[in-house]
Amino acid sequence: MDKITALVTESAELTPGIQSLTVRLPESTDWDVRPGQFAGLYPADGSMLLMRPISVCRWDPARRELRFVYRPAGAGTRSFTALREGDTIDLLGPLGNGYDTEALAGRHVLLLGGGIGVPPMLELAAALRNAGAETQVTAALGYRTDELFLAEDFRETGAEVLIATEDGTAGTKGTVLDAVREAGIRPDAVCACGPMPMLRAVKRYAEELGIDAWLSLEERMACGVGACLGCVVKTRETDAHSHVKNARICTEGPVFAAREVEIG
Amino acid sequence: MSARPDMSVTIAGVTLKNPVMTASGTFGSGMEYGQFVDLNRLGAVVTKGVANQPWEGNPTPRVTEVYGGMLNAIGLQNPGIDVFIERDLAFLSQYDTKVIVNVCGHTEEEYLEVVERLAEEKRVDMLEINVSCPNVKEGAIAFGQKPDALCRITERIKKIAAQPVIMKLTPNVTDIAEMARAAEAGGADAISLINTLTGMKIDIERRCFVLANRTGGMSGPAIKPIAVRMVWQAAQAVQIPVIGMGGIASAEDAVEFLLAGASAVAVGAMNFHDPYLTEKVADGIEAYLVRHGIGRVTDLIGAVNG
């Protein structure tokens, strides 16, 4: 884990309100990035002192390239949209635990991505492609409209892709779980990233089916490395670090077994 | 070739290899940032506040950024003194740095229980008493905003403490000099300041408070001029050493605090911006001394002219 200065190799709007940013890490870095991990991106303006935690969408170890797909929300993430090829950006990472792809190997894995929760699922879909022939991946992706960013990239990984849109302009009208039910699939495990109401529904869905579920959580963060205790989630059991029922999303997470977290 | 400047400072009989510490709550117990900096290079590690029992802290959101700084309302989540001694203190004692344990509590008795437990711990070099956290409902800041209450809790802690006692002061008072004198009158060996300034941020789109706790403590470079002013006022008011902190982002900032009268400095929120900062500040202070032909860092303490 370290803070490094990376070179921007691509920065573009994918669809309205969704940005893509690819950076190349310096040769001296030895980052080994797992799906579900994230990096802290620092705005160049020092009045914004905290990093912005953004999940890894793709990792190419041979080229040392990291791709992020993010939604500009505040001044910090908006400042990243001005980056151009050849610019530099400071990154802290790789952060968080990531998904345990070995635990998913050999299963029929359902990946659920809602909105800006879609991008981190792509690296997981790509990793699971190499997790043995018997591993089957279905990706159910939820969007507001028919601006289906990254859907084609999921298909390229070999995953079966289901689409849900809020306005019904593409795929199933409704949520990702509506699309899953409509397709009548029966997964052995589910991994999800998206807004909290979706994650709550996924937790219930997995409980009803009696299957394992892992959720990628987000929270406002300061340090990103487990020191400040800013980003915690209520847990069912006392966790080994905090000795209270509050685990650090940046360190014990962001990926948690659904049964371990109290998300209401 | 001239000799390297003497970077050591002595506070209440404890000699630190250099005047750079970590500000409580921004550095855990050193484990996390030990991946970035060599803890042996720091004058002292000041731990996150520890209480007699585990504390859950506040609901989230607990942190948010503001212009040139941040607000936090962690609420002193901590694993309690037993786990602290077994794990965090054991970890820190592997390093050649001084260990300053920050102590928190809701009541005088809770503080005293922790101080008593730590009295048996030879690996603890000093105690820093948090009577200034703005984010917990009982205790903490209540002891730090009234001179007589501050004096009294300092006296009670001093009676049982085996290590030198630093009282950490809040800037959320009318007269910092009066509070500094109260700590000194209670027998404090040193004071540290400033803790965070109480602030608030409102999300105008959702028309709600950003932090679950509504208010939070502000830290970061934006508060530094206030901190330098208060360190100077406190240092003028007392004979005991002052440890200065509040928005330090560089060695130059640290030198400012030393010139204002601080005997040591602590790096806080800016660790989050630059995890290597503590070491850079130590190196930068030394470079400043060399550049100005000053032989000892102690020559800077309170050396502002005029």
Image (tube, coloured by chain):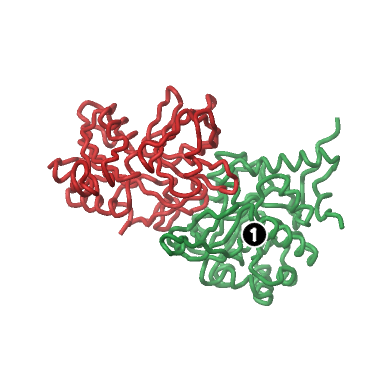
Q: Is residue A35 left or right of residue B224?
A: left
Q: Is residue A50 left or right of residue A163?
A: right
Quadrant in the picture for residue A120: top left
Q: Which chain is red?
A: A
Whole-percent x, y for residue B195 in the image: 63, 61
Q: Residue at x 15, y 46 (%)?
A: A181
Q: Which residue is mark 1?
A: B127
Residue A193 seen in this snapshot: yes
Q: Residue at x 53, y 24 (%)?
A: A27
- Compared with B260, A163 (above or below) is above
Q: Quick one: which residue is furthest to the bottom in this view?
A: B148
Residue B54 seen in this snapshot: no
Report the front residue among A133 and A159: A159
Whole-percent x, y for residue B111 in the image: 58, 67
Q: Secondary structure at mark 1?
A: strand
Q: Which chain is green?
A: B
Whole-percent x, y for residue A187 in the image: 18, 40
Q: Residues within 10 Å of mark 1 (few under 14, many from 20)?
A: many
Given the image, what chain letter belongs to the residue carrying mark 1? B
Q: Is residue B194 left or right of residue A200?
A: right
- The amino acid beneath tag 1 is Leu
Quadrant in the picture for residue A245: bottom left
